Amino acid sequence: MAANNSILIDVKRQLGDFSLDVKFASEGGLTAFFGRSGSGKTSLVNLLAGLDDPDSGTIEVNGTTLFNSRSGINVPIERRRLGYVFQDSRLFPHFNVKQNLKYATRFTDAGAPRHNFADIVDLLGLSSLLDRQPKSLSGGEKQRVAIGRALLAQPRLLLMDEPLASVDSGRKFEIISFIEDLRDQLSIPIVYVSHAMEEVIRLADTMVILDNGTAVAAGDVEDIMSRLDLRPLTGRYEAGAVVSVTVKGHDEHFQLSELIFAEKSLWVPRLDLDLGATLRVRIRARDVSLSRTRPENTSLLNIFAGTISEIAGNQGAQVEILLDIGVPLIARITRKSAVELRLGVGEQVFAMVKAAAIDRHSMGMAGTRARKIG
């Protein structure tokens, strides 16, 4: 049986011409299902929720078996204690916000751990909305209420299926901040479904990539994003390394922040974070340049010595190069440049990253496990 605060899935399901065959384990925190439309993300979540049954296999959450075909276990939906947040909020239009939130408490198990109403309202910033009707709320406000309602059902697992799909771009990062707080402050594992890489990178502890009904990769975000073989699934435009860093200091005069990783410094535009805070930074491959020698008299603040671990894409105009600089880093350069620099696996190079190229939306507070490590 799986340990507490964990998810174990090993299931098969035939849905017409589509076959779902997924196996992975997660240690809790926030587990993101990532993949293109039709890859099986929602189908898998429905199996977790009990909205559909596997043909065979096992589902365990927090050490409790929800489904086991060999043992004949199939816990009914109402006893699974799972909170489900959909793409649209699905609030009751005839209830105000407070009534929508309170409705969830009617179906809670008396023995379940309690999430205090006032604490959830405070965590999600809902106090000013309690007397309002759903029709008067913005898309982001509706989703916050929907999340609160799901949490007040005292779930052992929170399922979030594309929760930001109907939220305008201006509100997305506001909601992501609330989800970060949920991940870090509540001891509830979260399954988060998305095809938006920026959401996954900011939020996930564990990333599961689905393709054509199969989990082709599962693991820490940093490890998954450093794999060149997964570029067709993670997206060529999104290609780049994800690095866990700690805030070391701030330069108020130049409005920069110094982040450290593997005893190296990364300078970025000023962040409003305390010293010692841990976060993830995505460094896109297209923002990394390479040199055979250490550059002199350059405007670049971030220069890292490293070794080439892998080169991919030798037939097109561009190649992607995986470097070891103490952590994985990916550079995308032209094949012509790679040939002229005579780059090969094992060669020593210098990687250069513009501080201004690292935007705030590529950063997120490090996941639960990363915080414990940092």
Image: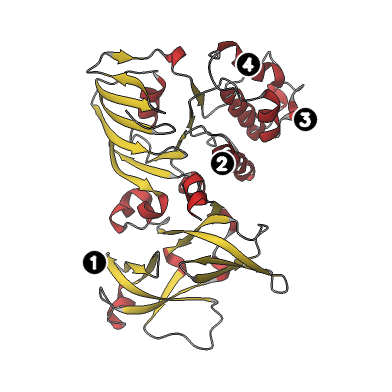
Q: What element carries label 4?
A: loop
Circle 4 is placed at which residue position?
92
Q: How far apart are marks 3 and 1 (CA)?
A: 58 Å
Label 2 amino acid?
Answer: Asp
User: CA separation, marks 1 and 2?
Assistant: 44 Å
Distance between the alpha carbons at the discs numbered 4 and 1: 55 Å
Quick one: label 2 or label 3, which is nearer the N terminus?
3
Earlier-in-chain disc, 4 versus 1: 4
Residue 364: x and y in percent read 55, 51
- Disc 1 or 2, which lies upstream in sequence? 2
Residue marked by disc 3: 128
Which residue does the numbered mark 2 point to in the structure image? 184
Image coordinates for residue 307, horizontal then vertical, percent: 33, 74
Mark sitting on residue 315: 1
| Mark closer to the observer (1, 2) | 2
In this rendering, would 119 be left or right of 17?
right
Asked where in the image residue 293 lies, by quadrant, the reply is bottom left
Dot 4 or dot 3, earlier in sequence? 4
Residue 124 visible (yes or no): no
Give SS at disc 2.
helix
Marks 4 and 2 in Cβ contact (< 8 Å) = no
Foreground of the two, 281 or 338: 281
Nearer the camera: disc 4 or disc 1: 4
Q: In this view, does 120 lie to the left or right of 280?
A: right
In the picture, residue 177 is in which quadrant? top right
Give the amino acid at mark 3.
Ser
When the figure is inspected, residue 133 is found, relative to residue 224, above or below; the finding is: above
Spatial CA span between label 4 and label 3: 18 Å
Q: At x 47% / y 67%, what residue is drawn?
A: 287
The answer for how far apart the CA atoms under marks 2 and 3 are is: 24 Å
